[in-house]
């Protein structure tokens, strides 16, 4: 089916179901809002690490456990939420998850906030953030499957990349807002603001997120899968590669604030600006990479190249830290920002490739598989970094992150030259 015929079929089917073709952008908007609101918690709370360590009276290993606990909840829930999405649909899963996440955050605002009289127990704080992760795991698979249902293969790289900009968008919002809230108004304001974001996103999903019907958007490049994604090694390989490549990214998101505070002696404003720069740069690069790979038809080659770029950027960062006594702090901070952007640019392309391999009807399960590995890494990474710091220097931490990125290269499939050539030719015409 050529592009014009496919577009006509999509437009006709959507009109029958009461939607115009442009409604797919509202669906994408609802997915972006949902992911951004939850990412403000998942990626934003770690930016309060310095204040959390002080207010909750935590050691670095305890801080690593707390920051990783949300990742544990996500790792446990992503796959069940993905399977539920394929069974019950995008809309009910997303609405349920957002409402439950907001409720959990409001409970934390009441029961898990330090005061002058008492500090919540480590177990309570860890369990509460894990519960937030359990509910928040609904967001990724449900919004991704909705986008797969509404967009054709020639737009999925861009659409999924735009959706993935929600992660740095939410993280950037968190980096700009949450450290200020934590340092001036305390953690009740942090959890309350995040709960409100999730409720607003639930309202947008209620208005905009609707199913286009039983007929899913397909192209010749995405045949219906013959096996369940859970039994498909190719899908597992991509999912595992995505998860491992997120480890260096989580190293930046969870401990870069501590690094800049302890090593670079930066204050609140400097830390917030640096982390916001990472998130904004990641947003720009994700949109560019999605559009670039849609036009070139080179998702697999791009993903393999991204692992090498990430490895190189962390190696340079490690060298900059080792030479820190001879370099201005601004140079070292700039290298943190560059490494953070370099290891964050590939997400939308990877998820588009994974969802295309699985097919729209099974995309929820496939995305859940990937996110299970991803958020297991979010649990492991901060704990490992905290203990790694006891054994080696910051330079050793960043060099290890680069080595991990390099390991991922063979997990992403080799490009199919003929397919790439055909897609490139059709896009040029």
Image (cartoon, rainbow, N blue to C red):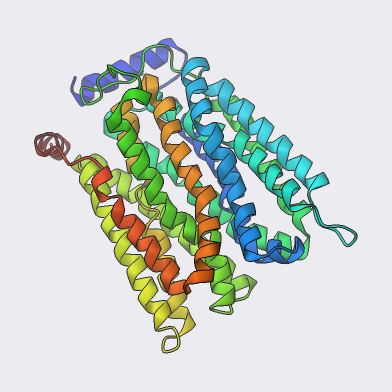
Choose top left, top right, bottom left or bottom right for residue 133: top right
Estimate the x, y position of residue 210 in percent, counting from the top left. Answer: 51, 21
Residue under the point 53% across and 27% down? 81
Residue 124 higher or lower than 256, as above or below? above
Indicate the quadrant containing the C terminus: top left, top right, bottom left or bottom right: top left
Q: Nearer the viewer, residue 43 or 119?
A: 119
Residue under the point 34% across and 23% down? 231
Estimate the x, y position of residue 299 in percent, counting from the top left. Answer: 24, 42
Q: Residue furthest bottom?
A: 326
Query: Is 359 situated left or right of 297 in this image?
Result: right
Residue under the point 57% across and 28% down? 94
Residue 157 visible in the shown view: no
Choose top left, top right, bottom left or bottom right for residue 230: top left
Query: Is 261 situated left or right of 373 in this image?
Result: right
Q: Which of 371 and 37 is in front in this view?
A: 371
**Count of number-bearing discs:** 0
Q: Which residue lies furthest to the right in this view?
A: 117
Choose top left, top right, bottom left or bottom right for residue 319: bottom left
Estimate the x, y position of residue 114 in percent, counting from the top left. Answer: 81, 57
Residue 428 higher or lower than 58, as above or below? above
Q: Which of 100 and 429 is in front in this view?
A: 100
Residue under the point 63% across and 75% down? 267
Estimate the x, y position of residue 379 in percent, counting from the top left. Answer: 54, 48
């Amino acid at each position: 089916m050529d592009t014009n015929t496919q577009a006509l079929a999509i437009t006709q089917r959507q009109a029958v179901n009461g939607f115009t073709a442009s409604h797919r952008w509202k669906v994408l908007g609802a997915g972006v809002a949902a992911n951004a609101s939850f990412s403000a918690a998942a990626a934003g709370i770690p930016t309060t690490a310095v204040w959390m360590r002080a207010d909750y009276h935590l050691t670095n290993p305890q801080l690593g456990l707390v920051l990783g606990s949300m990742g544990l909840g996500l790792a446990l829930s992503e796959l069940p939420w993905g399977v539920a999405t394929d069974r019950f649909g995008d809309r009910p899963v997303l609405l349920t998850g957002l409402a439950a996440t907001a409720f959990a955050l409001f409970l934390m605002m009441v029961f898990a906030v330090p005061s002058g009289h008492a500090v919540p127990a480590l177990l309570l704080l860890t369990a509460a953030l894990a519960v937030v992760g359990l509910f928040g795991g609904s967001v990724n698979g449900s919004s991704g499957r909705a986008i797969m249902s509404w967009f054709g293969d020639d737009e999925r790289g861009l659409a999924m990349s735009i959706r993935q900009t929600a992660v740095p968008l939410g993280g950037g919002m968190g980096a700009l807002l949450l450290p200020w809230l934590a340092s001036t108004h305390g953690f009740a304001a942090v959890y309350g603001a995040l709960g409100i974001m999730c409720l607003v996103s639930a309202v947008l999903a209620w208005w905009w997120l609707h199913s286009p019907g039983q007929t899913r958007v397909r192209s010749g490049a995405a045949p219906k899968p013959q096996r369940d994604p859970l039994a498909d090694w190719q899908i597992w390989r991509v999912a595992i590669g995505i998860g491992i490549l997120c480890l260096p990214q989580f190293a930046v998101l969870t401990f870069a604030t501590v690094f800049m505070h302890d090593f670079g002696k930066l204050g609140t404003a400097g830390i917030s600006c640096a982390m916001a720069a990472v998130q904004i740069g990641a947003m720009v690069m994700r949109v560019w990479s999605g559009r670039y790979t849609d036009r070139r038809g080179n998702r697999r080659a791009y993903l393999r190249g991204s692992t090498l770029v990430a490895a190189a950027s962390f190696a340079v960062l490690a060298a900059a830290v080792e030479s820190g006594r001879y370099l201005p702090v601004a140079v070292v901070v700039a290298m943190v920002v560059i490494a953070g952007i370099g290891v964050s640019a590939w997400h939308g392309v990877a998820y588009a490739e994974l969802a295309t391999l699985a097919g729209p009807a099974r995309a929820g399960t496939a995305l859940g598989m990937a996110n299970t590995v991803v958020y297991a890494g979010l649990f492991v990474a901060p704990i490992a970094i905290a203990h790694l710091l006891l054994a080696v220097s910051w330079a050793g931490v960043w060099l290890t992150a680069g080595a991990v990125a390099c390991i991922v290269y063979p997990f992403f499939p080799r490009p199919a030259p003929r397919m790439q050539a055909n897609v490139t030719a059709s896009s040029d015409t």
